[in-house]
Image: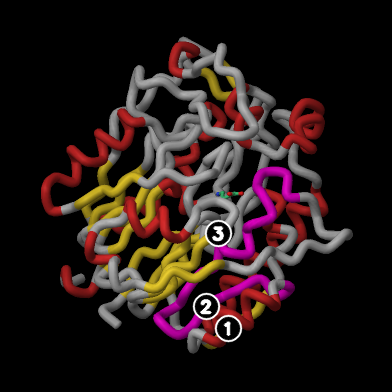
């Protein structure tokens, strides 16, 4: 393939190829310090009881149907959809330093893969249960390499006990990281790539050393802008801000004040509009969001500058986006949301055209 036919030419350009995750064999992470620091308090018991076991079958089955429907809709728009390979997540993972009861899943390609034009970086993730997750993407990465992408695999982190600040007193009102700087780690979903500018955050899965590693690898052609938010248990940035099209960013008003966000971004964003997202619609009989806040309403996927996929129950957000000229495709995704993300997390764009 020609170099001009691959990569992300414009973050808001026409979507042509994408990875959509799978929930097959998804396992509940064990209750360790990282899960304790990031997951909703009301589900700590769930993790305690079910760590290493399968997620409830009904949510896996429901999410599979939702993912297949999501995939079909993308394909009906002429978009090529790649899926990771099923690998066995039920097996314990062990290294000379530690052992887990199980793996996690291959549901969230956004967490693992950072695509910057024609570079694909496989994030050195800090959750031990995600140590083997890249295996589900090996065939796809080989395919993308043959298409002309540069695949970048950072040194595998050791994830020894000493990486985690066991004595940190978890605080509900401000962020004190579980991670120290003993080796670089990050999740790809802590970064949003806007051409040559990458907006990111430090979190319970991304440390300063990880951010430095990324800066060094990307070099002078890229600017990494790290923002501070009010998120007291940050893990992934895509329920905090979500750029919608050139000049427009959707903002979670509980996580960051628009003026504060503006003041932290480079000059190029001075003329951009920042719009507050409406509160998520939560219904009593919704499946449990074991691994996220309710703000997954923001976690949408744009197919181009005029089209977005939004969860079908999120009417206030649909109305807002329509006001900004978007055609909205509403689809169900509540079962998938049990696993910690929505459309944006479940996907990773591989090719976007210029417009
Ligand atoms: O509640 O902020 C964001 C997305 C996680 N992958 C949250 C979750």
Label pair 2/1, CB-CB below 8 angstroms: yes
Label pair 1/3, CB-CB below 8 angstroms: no
User: What residue does disc 1 label?
Assistant: 328
Spatial separation of the CA atoms under disc 2 and disc 1: 5 Å
Foreground label between 1 and 3: 3
Mark 3 or mark 2, which is nearer the start of the sequence? 3
The magenta segment is: 289-313
The part of the image, by quadrant, that contains residue 31 is top right
Most distant residue in the front direction = 259
Which residue lies at the image location 45% right of the left edge and 77% below the top edge?
Answer: 303
In the image, residue 15 lies in the stretch drawn in magenta: no
Question: Residue 328: horizontal and vertical position, in percent?
Answer: 58, 83
The part of the image, by quadrant, that contains residue 295 is bottom right
Q: Is residue 351 above or below residue 124?
A: below
Check residue 252 in the rendering and tell me which mark sits there, or answer none.
Answer: 3
The part of the image, by quadrant, that contains residue 140 is bottom left
Query: 331 and 151: which one is in front?
Result: 331
Which residue lies at the image location 43% right of the left edge and 46% below the top edge?
Answer: 190
Q: Is residue 36 above or below residue 232?
A: above
Spatial separation of the CA atoms under disc 2 and disc 3: 17 Å
Would you call the spot at circle 3 few (<14 residues within 10 Å), some (14-19), or many (20 or more)? many
Query: 343 and 65: which one is in front?
Result: 343
User: What residue does disc 2 label?
Assistant: 308
In the image, residue 291 lies in the stretch drawn in magenta: yes
């Amino acid at each position: 393939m020609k170099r001009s036919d691959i990569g992300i030419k414009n973050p808001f350009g026409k979507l042509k190829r994408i990875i959509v995750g799978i929930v097959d064999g998804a396992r509940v992470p064990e209750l360790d310090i990282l899960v304790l620091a990031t997951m909703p308090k009301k589900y700590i018991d769930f993790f305690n009881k079910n760590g290493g076991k399968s997620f409830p079958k009904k949510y896996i089955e429901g999410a599979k149907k939702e993912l297949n429907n999501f995939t079909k809709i993308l394909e009906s728009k002429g978009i090529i959809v790649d899926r990771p390979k099923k690998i066995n997540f039920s097996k314990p993972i062990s290294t000379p330093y530690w052992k887990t009861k199980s793996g996690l899943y291959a549901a969230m390609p956004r967490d693992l893969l950072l695509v910057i034009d024609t570079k694909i970086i496989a994030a050195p993730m800090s959750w031990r249960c995600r140590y083997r997750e890249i295996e589900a993407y090996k065939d796809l990465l080989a395919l993308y390499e043959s298409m002309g992408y540069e695949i970048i695999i950072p040194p595998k982190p050791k994830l020894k006990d000493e990486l985690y600040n066991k004595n940190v007193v978890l605080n509900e009102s401000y962020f004190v990281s579980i991670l120290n700087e003993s080796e670089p780690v990050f999740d790809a979903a802590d970064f949003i790539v806007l051409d040559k500018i990458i907006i990111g955050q430090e979190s319970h899965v991304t440390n300063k050393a990880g951010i430095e590693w990324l800066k060094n690898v990307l070099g002078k052609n890229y600017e990494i802008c790290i923002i501070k938010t009010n998120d007291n248990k940050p893990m992934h940035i895509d329920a905090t801000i979500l750029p919608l099209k050139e000049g427009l960013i959707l903002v979670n008003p509980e996580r960051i004040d628009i003026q504060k966000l503006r003041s932290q971004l480079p000059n190029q964003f001075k003329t951009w509009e920042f719009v507050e997202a409406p509160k998520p619609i939560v219904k009593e009989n919704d499946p449990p969001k074991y691994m996220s806040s309710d703000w997954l309403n923001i976690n949408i996927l744009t197919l181009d500058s005029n089209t977005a996929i939004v969860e079908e129950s999120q009417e206030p957000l649909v109305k807002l986006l329509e006001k900004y000229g978007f055609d909205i495709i509403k689809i169900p995704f509540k079962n998938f949301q049990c696993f910690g993300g929505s459309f944006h997390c479940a996907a990773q764009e591989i090719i976007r055209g210029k417009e």
